Amino acid sequence: MNTSVTSASARIDVLDMVRGLAILGIFILNIGGFALPSAAYLNPLYTPAASATDIATWAVLSVLVQGKFLGMFALLFGATLMMLSRYSQPWNMARLLVLGVIGLLHTALLWDGDILLMYSLTGVAACWIIHNVSSRWWLKLVPVLILTGLFLLFFLLSEGGELKLLYWQPSQEMLDYEVLIADTGGIAGMLDRISTISGMLMMMVVQYGWQLLAMMLLGATLMKNGWLKGAYPLSHYRRLAAWLLIPSLLLQAVVMWLEYLNGWSVFWMGTIGYPLADILQPVQTTGLIALFYGLQPQLKPVAACLQRVGRTALSSYLLQSVCGVILFEYLGYFSQFDRLTLLAFVPLMWLINILFSTLWLRYFSQGPVEWLWRQAANKLAAR
């Protein structure tokens, strides 16, 4: 018998579960951002010392993880904007402004891999579209936005020349500088992180922001038509997961193999591999959520844990940064482990997230940063 994923009264719970899954999944790649030089995220050969195991780990993570959980989080962000659209646009804008301030503080005080500022700024555009553009246009805008971002990316790659190669294959001096900043920390580290904000904003404008906005509008669409609420039969979600995930992951794996055969060249990866990943992100993200919904009966043992992490998503995300900075900067383990070894830390962080959210929600109805966010947004909107 085909039953829907959730009853009407439990629909918000399933969104919290997916949000919790996204937060935990994000850390699989983010740990590399805390522990390795920035070029390691994109280039498996960022250092001549990269081993075959390290390269293989990067390739597997790129196919199975990269962009999937961030895409999931962006999609859910758009769904939340859709749910909150019943409130006034000034209140929603105040909420996004406060999130941007949190993102700036996160960057300055903790980590330059922040996503909150980009979500805040891109969310302003998504919020405006949701409030002012007919919902029948939202899904149509998704491919337009993605292709616009890719066009700008190609232009950037064609014009970037030496700067592109510098960030793709950093010199030993640049690698040593990142280690020095991680070891030094303090004011020097803060100033270095603040200096990255302009580059992040440039990338948001010329490429990533378009992708992010597309994912938010996709999430808003899937929330409005009931798909994200779990209103469809389990068989629908399972069938859709198979149709979306199997061919797209196989295609990405084939392209990854071709990248390997071409020596992981910046040209091949920049013009084929990463653009393909951007195009497939909406497909694979939707497929992963469909798989999660379709396996709801089998996931009941972990559902409560995921839901609690999802209810404290912002606090849990920032907690990951605190733990990552303490371990890899203050304790001096930056650039000390390869990618495979770093994965051993991931379940430990998941456990910390689950324990924190479980203990906190015993006494409070929402996470600490969520509470501050709401209070600040309410006061700002009331002015």
Image (tube, rainbow, N blue to C red):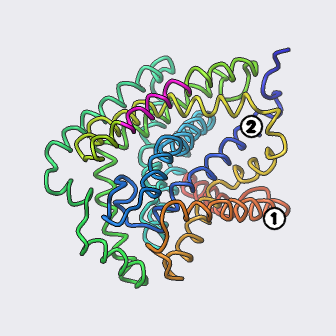
Is the residue 374 above or below the residue 71 in the image? below
Is the residue 144 above or below the residue 149 in the image? above
Label whose residue precedes the other's in the sequence (1 or 2): 2
The residue depicted at 46 percent of the width and 36 percent of the height is 126
Residue 66 percent across, percent down from the top left: 48, 45
The disc labelled 2 sits on which kind of residue? Val
Residue closer to the observer: 375 or 352: 352
Residue closer to the observer: 231 or 21: 21
Residue 90 percent across, percent down from the top left: 51, 44
The disc labelled 1 sits on which kind of residue? Leu
Is the residue 335 above or below the residue 3 in the image? below
Q: Is residue 337 left or right of residue 167?
A: right
User: Which residue is the site of mark 1?
Assistant: 359
Q: Is residue 228 left or right of residue 137?
A: right
Residue 10 percent across, percent down from the top left: 81, 34
Question: Which SS class for mark 1?
Answer: helix
Question: Which SS class for mark 2?
Answer: helix
**Count of marks overlaid on the render:** 2
What is the magenta range?
246-257
The residue depicted at 74 percent of the width and 18 percent of the height is 235
Mark seen at residue 14: 2
Assess whether residue 247 is covered by the magenta stretch: yes
Mark 1 to mark 2 CA distance (whole Å): 20 Å
The residue depicted at 80 percent of the width and 61 percent of the height is 364
Could you say which quadrant of the image residue 234 lies in?
A: top right
The residue depicted at 42 percent of the width and 51 percent of the height is 118
